Amino acid sequence: MAGRPIPSSIFNSEMKNVWKGAIRWTVFAMCFMATIEMASRIDQWWTYGAPVLGVYTYDTALFAIDEFGIHGRPDGRYEKWRLNAFGFRGDDVSLEKTSDRVRIVCVGASETFGFYEKPGNEWPRRLEQDLLNEGVQAEVINAAIAGMSLPQRIQHLKHRLLRFKPDVVIMMLEYGSYAGLTNEVIQARKRALPSLPDRQNLVAGLKSIRVLSRLKDIALPQLPAPLQEAVGKMERTFKMGLVKRDLGARFGSFTHVKPFEVEALKADLEQLSEVAGAAGVQLILVSPAMWNTEQNFFGIALSWPYLNESWWRDAQTLLPLAVKEFAQRRGIPYLDLSEVVGGREEELMKDFLHFSDRGAAEVARRIGQQIIPSQLSHGAIQ
């Protein structure tokens, strides 16, 4: 009969069936994901020698800390990346330097360490090969560490790298850590205990779930290019939403390079020059390349969420100019990689800061052109 109420017993029975169905599907989904997660861990163990249990990420597998800050983990392994016994990327090296070779140490962040390039194609490795092809007996040590500020790189050089008695140090500079600097911030950083980047947030937690990374590495490349691009955009948008939620009004709050930030960079360059000079090391300064596109600025905001696009545009002009003036005054070889890649960014770069294989080869070639003349004038290369 129309309008007759449903007996409560029938309603409750239907609700129980709905809940039972939901629970069954939830349990099934959890078991399915757990199975795939375990399969991913076994696959990584078989392919890369990764631990089956515990966290296996780029940072935890490759880097550690000591009293001087972050450093490469000796014999660290993560997917395509391999570190030697001293925590440097590349083949093993000896502490003692042979007299018939010029020893070159490259210091920088991920654009020097190598990110998108195939193993052996990062620019320090290509530089070594180029020099050998030119008849220069050279040994290039890639001592870059992802995420290091310039003050941290100076400590890295002073306390870890000078014992290798390098003839040349190529310092790839960075500018992001100067945003928002004040005297108080500098003093606070000096008092802070060395630590790895914070990995307790949700984005980092998602990275520790291996099935997500394996699906991204294996399944995503099988999709049509437009769909790959759409999935990538969705991922970036999701992560950006989390960052904006956490920072609120502080997101993108640094909008212009301030005079104090430029002066802080100059002070760090003075300290770097003093450390290298005291050790009798030829210093070469390199400004990073920056590829300015809307998508690249969107991606870089995940690493430097406080920095506005306008700050980066200021930095690309003002900070390399300060470095160039410093280098000319001190007689230090200097190369601005933005001039090297200018007009060829799509060919030579993969994102805001990192190179393609071809880009790394071009960087190596251009840096090699700086090294050989400067070393000939100092008698380091015979």
Image (cartoon, rainbow, N blue to C red):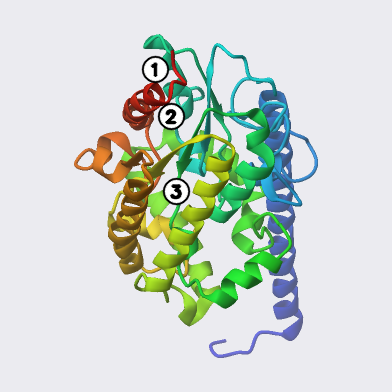
Tell me if label 2 and label 1 are in contact, CB under 8 Å: no
Q: Say left or right for 129 vs 369.
A: right
Quadrant of the image occupied by residue 127: top left
Q: Report the number of numbered marks.
A: 3
**Mark 3: amino acid:** Leu
Q: Looking at this view, is 48 or 318 the one in front? A: 318
* Secondary element at image label 2: helix
Tell me if label 2 and label 3 are in contact, CB under 8 Å: no
Q: Which residue is mark 1?
A: 130
Q: Is residue 67 above or below residue 115?
A: below
Q: Whole-Å distance between the Cαs marked 3 and 1?
A: 22 Å
Residue at the image position 66 percent from the left and 56 percent from the top? 205
Q: Is residue 193 above or below residue 121?
A: below
- Between circles 2 and 1, the one closer to the viewer is 1
Quadrant of the rendering where the N terminus is positioned? bottom right
**Mark 1: amino acid:** Asp
Extreme-left residue of the structure: 343
Residue at the image position 63 percent from the left and 19 percent from the top? 97
Q: Looking at this view, is 20 or 145 the one in front? A: 145
Looking at marks 2 and 3 on the same chain, the residue that comes earlier in the sequence is marked by 2
Please provide percent x and percent y for residue 365: 33, 25
Disc 1 packing (10 Å; few <14; some 14–19; many ≥20): some
Please provide percent x and percent y for residue 85: 72, 27
Quadrant of the image occupied by residue 236: bottom left
Disc 2 packing (10 Å; few <14; some 14–19; many ≥20): many
Numbered badge on residue 173: 3
